[in-house]
Amino acid sequence: MKTLSNLRNKPLEEIDPQIFEAIKGEISREQNKIVLIASENYVSKAVLEAQGSVLTNKYAEGYPGHRYYGGCEYADIVESLAIQRAQSLFEYRDGEDTVKVDHVNVQVHSGSQANMAAYLSILKQGDRILGMGLDHGGHLTHGSKVNFSGMLFDNIYYGVDRETGHIDYNRVRELALEARPKMIVAGASAYSRTLDFKAFYDIAKEVGAYLLVDIAHIAGLIAVGLHPSPVSYADFITSSTHKTLRGPRGGMVMCKSAYAKAVDKMVFPGIQGGPLIHVIAAKAVAFKEALTEDFREYQIKTLKNARKLCDGLAERGYKIVSDGTDNHLMLVDLRNKGITGKEAEEALGRADITINKNAIPYDEKPPTITSGIRLGTPAVTTRGFSEAEMEEVADIIDNCLRNPSNERNMQMQRQRVRALCERFPI
Ligand SMILES: *Cc1c(COP(=O)(O)O)cnc(C)c1O
């Protein structure tokens, strides 16, 4: 029998070769494939280092200065910095005024937990929520029947216009006037157009609903001013921290001061126990990075790359839902190409391009098949791709989707992917 003291100081490779090998495999997967999954990114070394730190050992139930455990002096520093930096990140100038986030909770473990905490802080079971339908680009937590949000609340959905692919704000208003929801949720996982937060705010105000804006996908763009901010309009802003924001897997809730206490109480002790202080440390580091000019330039490039990829596909006869993109992602409607989303995902996977199939609005195929794919540029932009590479990626995608059963073709495309990946190490 090995004793515990024998195990304590050995490297992972010796203690657990299976996990060590899986991590090694993941490193080479990330290096050798082109990731166009719109919700993924590569964090910095500093973020990884913070997350892999001894802070994982610490219990810190409660909030900075008010903990239920001793020994929280460093946890307090970490969490306070994360909160301050989040506030700086989402603060902006509007003419003479500085618009600020009143309150931030950085303890939520994920974007889904952020929504759960925000909903439960002021809604009761059975209350009505108006959110974007999952089948039109909304998120599971915006009222899908298989999610807690659909189980606990009475949900109605808005979507996009069949012709334009844009959110139809008149329709949102009609639905709101008809159904009188307690809360309206703005935000999406697969919507490529700028969101009009003022329009949502006016509708919410007219019907007396709370407004929650879920910025999980576009948080990084908002932080640098490349997408309008919801801060002056929303009662609650929820986000994940690992998409365009390029932090560790996690979430955050921001809210007006009136709801600060209720949100904090709902996060802990309402729906969570001890906060993940090591992850909060990594969030703090990511927020610091996001406050730099480098990060702003990164977001500008992410948008340029998305536009280039979009144009490259459109030139090759692909129909883009809403005919373009204002942000980091796009939905490709494959119906005119005689290939399903599932087949496209599989074909691109064989060429070492990782994407996800995605329902398009008014999709007639089931979610396991779909008629579309979702593509995003945050990850490839982090690794250094610029517009020339996006043009090549569009061409590779087109070649794969036109001729997926030709092995020679697929091998050629895979080689092109490999060459690109080698030029841009992660
Ligand atoms: C990704 C996403 C979330 C959830 O994030 P998780 O961290 O995966 O729970 C919530 N809302 C929207 C709109 C998202 O895109």
Image (tube, grey):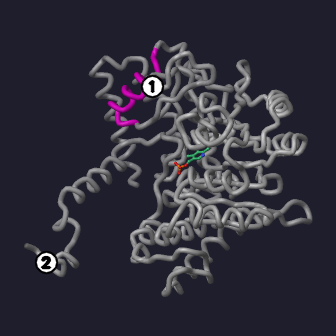
97 to 348, vertically: above or below: below
Packing grade of label 2 (10 A; few <14, some 14-19, many >=20) is few
Considering only vertical position in the picture, is 394 above or below 122?
above
The residue beneath circle 1 is: 368
Residue positioned 65% across, 59% down in the render: 253
Mark 2 lies on residue: 3
Callout 1: helix, strand or loop? loop
| Amino acid on which the number 1 mark rests in the picture | Thr
SS class of the residue under badge 2? loop
Q: Is residue 377 left or right of residue 207?
A: left
| Foreground: disc 2 or disc 1 | 2
Residue 69 point in image, percent of width and height: 50, 82
Residue 340 shown in magenta: yes
Residue placed farthest to the front in the image? 125
Q: Position of residue 163 (x, y in %)?
A: 73, 18
Q: Tag 1 or tag 2, which sits nearer the N-term?
A: 2
**Quarter-of-image position of residue 304:** top right
**Furthest-left residue in this view:** 1
- The answer to whether residue 306 of the structure is visible from this angle is no
Residue at x-position 77% and y-position 49%: 228
In front: 13, or 214? 214
Q: Which label belongs to residue 76?
A: none
Work out how far the residue at label 2 is from the one at label 1, CA to CA, in angstroms.
Answer: 48 Å
**Considering only vertical position in the picture, is 359 above or below 194?**
above
Quadrant the N terminus occupies: bottom left
Whole-percent x, y for residue 280 in the image? 53, 69
Magenta span of residues: 339-353
